[in-house]
Amino acid sequence: MFDAETKTMILALLYVLLPLLDVWCYAEESLRAGASTRMDCVRASEQCLKEQACSTKYRTMRQCVTGGKESNFSMVAGLEAKDECRSAMDALKQSPLYNCRCKRGMKKEKNCLRIYWGIYQTLQGNDFLEDSPYEPVNSRLSDIFRLAPILGEPAVARENNCLNAAKACNLNDTCKKYRSAYISPCTSRVSTAEICNKRKCHKALRQFFDKVPPKHSYGMLYCSCPLSDQTACSERRRQTIVPVCSYEEKQKPNCLELQGSCKTNYICKSRLADFFVNCQPEPRSLSGCLKENYADCLLAYSGLIGTVMTPNYLRSPNISVSPYCDCSNSGNNKDECDKFREFFTENTCLRNAIQAFGNGTDVGVWQPLSPVQTTTSTTTHYQKNRERSPNIIDNQINTDPGIYHFCGSLQDPQIDSPSTSNAIVKNSSPSRQPAGLASLLLPLVWLWYCSLPTLLSLGDL
């Protein structure tokens, strides 16, 4: 249809327009984040305690739940006391504590998460992991995903990118510093019985993925491997987190028992909730993700590394990950255990996100995706008693036209079919994407349309 010169002109025009579009999208995300930024839970708690009315209600609420999770009113008796508890909870919904969140890797992260879960479990009336305690991170797509060819075949790994990523890390001061900081405790034998200090290893791994720029940390964790060197390359990728220390155990625990252990630790519990929310598969989504955001899923997955729920790649020809656990000895909970484990091993959203990053084929900014109205989740223990809890509202993805926003839409032309995924939790905080600065797309489209006659005429010359 077009000769070589015309194609060159078209690509040149796109080359100019796309960076502008990326900047506008980033500006829009920043403005929206600035307008809706919530106070972190530590500051919200400090502010509440300085105000007499809020402080009184906050202390009352904490007394109401001191006795345990089973009953919100276990430390008080009688209808009057229960009314007082409900009054305190309703009052806190009007305080900064109600919408507070935490930042991953923040100085007082554990304390912040403790406050968050105390409020969340009280107001929601359950211990389900259906919302993330972390403030969303707005990342420019170009900062995370490598620019892929716009036309033609997707990028395919032709060399050992995992080896190249390790070399690149050694050339970056920050990456080299934090990598050395986890390699040391993860490879140093403590005694004849202990091959390492797992606690120190996990802490150093969390710092690596929290502090090192994704360009380097993701490069090592999500690197792609050439078809000619799958075995050696994928093994290098699997060894990134020093699995002999950070991942493996003397005996493989049951997955539900491992999850129970994770939920007793504020950081592990929060990272797991973040993973459930941001890597939720959706069979009707082109990307395979309910939230249509690969970057958030990759961040959530990396956040699990350095907890008791640390996942890693399985020795498999396909991209498949799992915590170090199985579903043996699950008894009557075998189906529940299988669903939990399959959220890792068969997660199409996560698999597509890893492939998109590794191959540099994330071209979703080109094609806005129609919104997914609801999720067809498999019922699990996270949803079994939803109707019994009046405080829990079933969520739907907003179908407002404003959600047709392309800045965060992500897909890969060579991704797995999402229909094989098993869903575990519903996304409880779908983001509404206003048009905002993205409305500037109209002038760009108009410019493109107006330039077509000229380009067509040049093509006929």
Image: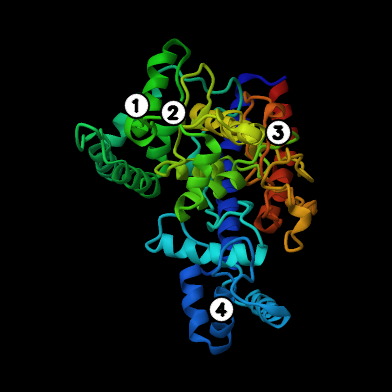
State the CA–CA distance, disc 3 to disc 2: 23 Å
Q: Give the residue drawn at x 48%, y 85%.
A: 50
Q: Earlier in the sequence, mark 4 or mark 2?
A: 4
> Whole-percent x and y of residue 38?
56, 67
The circle drawn on residue 58 is: 4
| Residue in front for this viewpoint, 41 or 328 | 328
Mark 4 element type: helix
State the CA–CA distance, disc 2 to disc 1: 9 Å
**Other-residue count near label 1 (Cα within 10 Å), few / some / many at <14 / 14–19 / ≥20:** few
Residue 52 quadrant: bottom right
- Name the amino acid type tagged 4: Tyr
> Whole-percent x and y of residue 157?
47, 20
Q: Quadrant of the N terminus?
A: top right
Q: Give the residue drawn at x 59%, y 27%.
A: 8
- Name the amino acid type tagged 1: Asn
Determine whether, in the image, residue 195 is placed left or right of residue 447.
Answer: left
The circle drawn on residue 164 is: 1
Is 130 located above or below residue 314 in the figure? below
State the CA–CA distance, disc 3 to disc 4: 44 Å
Q: Earlier in the sequence, mark 3 or mark 4?
A: 4
What residue is shown with label 2? 223
> Whole-percent x and y of residue 2?
69, 21
State the CA–CA distance, disc 4 to disc 2: 47 Å
State the CA–CA distance, disc 1 to disc 3: 31 Å
Callouts 2 and 1 close, C-beta under 8 Å = yes
